Image (tube, helix red, strand yellow):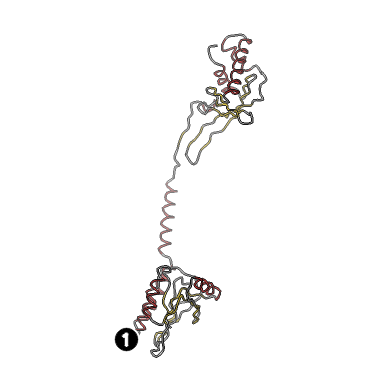
Amino acid sequence: MNKSVAHYISELLFLHDCVIVPEFGGFVGNRQSAKLNKTTGALTPPSKQVLFNTNLKTNDGLLISHIANQEGVAQDIAKQNVTIFSDESNGKLNTSKVLRIEKIGLFTVGREGNILFLQDSSTNYSLDSFGMKVNYSKPVTSKSDSKKQVEATVQTIRTKSRNPKTLLRAVAVLIPLFALSYLSISQQERINNVYTQMATLSPFTTTEKITEVVEIITVKDHIIEVSPEIIETPIIEEVESPVFTQQKTYYIIAGAFSEQKNANKMLDKLTRWNYNAEIIEGGNLLRVSYESYKNRKEAVLALNKIQQANASAWLLTK
């Protein structure tokens, strides 16, 4: 023969969807549409998926007739050549468990004796895609889409820059600062205590949300009311008029709560951490302290140490 049986099988797969090799098996072609891989951008042209069926062994005459016509030989000689091809292929599968037929695919024998077939991807048997190759393309973005993305980004930046919560936090700190300017010079120690509390505040640190809280700051004969908004920053508690004849107590505050159950949770947590924690009532809030001190310097030193773990902790003087 001028050409091999495998070559004629490959020729027939271009023209037919089923090619049977007597005593070996049949090749069945399934047409596949063009596919686009969105991840890689690969556009695959139409193709023909070839499957192998070992049960299709009955001679239908297609392969033998095609070989006889192409080689110009009798049907018997063509049949004899096909039989030799089938015997050699079955023999290789039985001995080495692997068989490769050029332009068709790879055959392997599984553990249960079944034959596994993997098609050779180098040959596309679909005549509809003759001359076509896999193309890679990038997604095209229209000018209108780019303009919308830019506008959305600008709108996001504007929204973030006008965050009202940041303004509320700043106001909550600035109002008490203005009130301090009206204190007399004789209350210098009281001013220092309040400034110590203000130093522990961070207007940009978010704590528990407190809804409809009205804080009253008593400064001598002046009363300043903070607007009842949702404030997410630590709030300065009531500053009582100083009594110089009374011993002061300094509390390191871990948090202020409007509900008893939340205050109790914080109290239990601090107690487990071996702090002498307690709940300090007064005003509209329940304040939970780490420790209490009679000496202001000791309280400030302890506050600085605690703030290394909890930056929102602050000092309350009563």
Q: Quadrant of the C terminus?
A: bottom left
16 vs 54, nearest the viewer: 54
Tell me if residue 124 comes above or below residue 65 in the rendering.
below
* Horizontal and vertical percent position of residue 205: 42, 68
| Image point (41%, 57%), residue name | 154
Q: Quadrant of the N terminus?
A: top right
Q: Quadrant of residue 222?
A: bottom left
Tell me if residue 54 comes above or below residue 144 in the rendering.
above
Q: Amino acid at mark 1?
A: Ile
* Horizontal and vertical percent position of residue 27: 61, 25
Badge 1 local density, few (<14 within 10 Å), some, or many (20+)? few
Across the whole image, how many numbered discs are drawn on residues?
Answer: 1
| Outermost residue, front side | 274
| Outermost residue, bottom side | 245
Tell me if residue 195 comes above or below residue 100 in the rendering.
below
Q: Which residue is mark 1?
A: 185
247 vs 170, nearest the viewer: 247
311 vs 225, nearest the viewer: 311
* Horizontal and vertical percent position of residue 200: 39, 73
Q: Secondary structure at mark 1?
A: helix
* Horizontal and vertical percent position of residue 183: 35, 85
